Amino acid sequence: MIVPVTCPSGKVIEWVLVELQGKIENLTEDQTSEIGVLLSKDPDGKALQLTIGYHQLEGKRIPLKKPLAILSKCGGTTVAGSSSTSYEVLGVIRIQYLFKTRPRALISKPAGR
């Protein structure tokens, strides 16, 4: 079976896969877009530091061996009793940010001392 895959704009958006140790939970329902601050320690961007609240994770940037495509299923059409499905490419993942160590707790000084 041939499944058509198209990219409507001609330009594919680059996505990044982030792999973490643990689970991220929202405390409120309206917090959906920003979870933390990602910094690069090296000029080439291979050593990473992710700060989420009072937790800090150390990680690295790894290129994937095989790129992953993010697809969206388009409406299927029915022709003479048979259905056909097509997919649209939303993005491509070529890089993974891997944080495989447990988070380190950040302790700050009390204000006014």
Image (cartoon, rainbow, N blue to C red):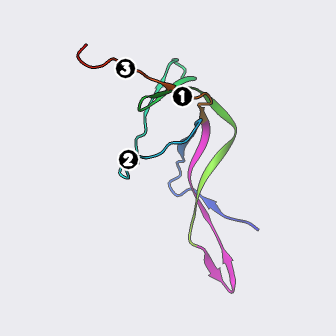
Residue 75, quarter of picture: bottom right
**Residue 86 at what x, y percent from top left?**
62, 66
User: Front-most of 65 and 9?
Assistant: 65
Q: Nearer the viewer, mark 2 or mark 3?
A: 3
Q: Check the image and report above or below for 59 versus 92.
A: above
| SS class, disc 2 | loop
Query: According to the image, label 3 marks what residue?
Result: 108
Q: Is residue 107 left or right of residue 87?
A: left
User: Front-most of 6 and 97?
Assistant: 97
Query: According to the image, label 2 marks what residue?
Result: 31
In this picture, which residue range is highlighted in magenta? Answer: 76-95
Q: Is residue 73 left or right of residue 30?
A: right
Q: Residue at coordinates 65% horizontally, 82% vertically from top-left?
A: 79
| SS class, disc 1 | loop
Q: Residue at coordinates 63% horizontally, 60% vertically from top-left?
A: 5
Q: Check the image and report above or below for 99 versus 68.
A: above
**Residue 15 at what x, y percent from top left?**
54, 42
Query: According to the image, label 1 marks what residue?
Result: 103
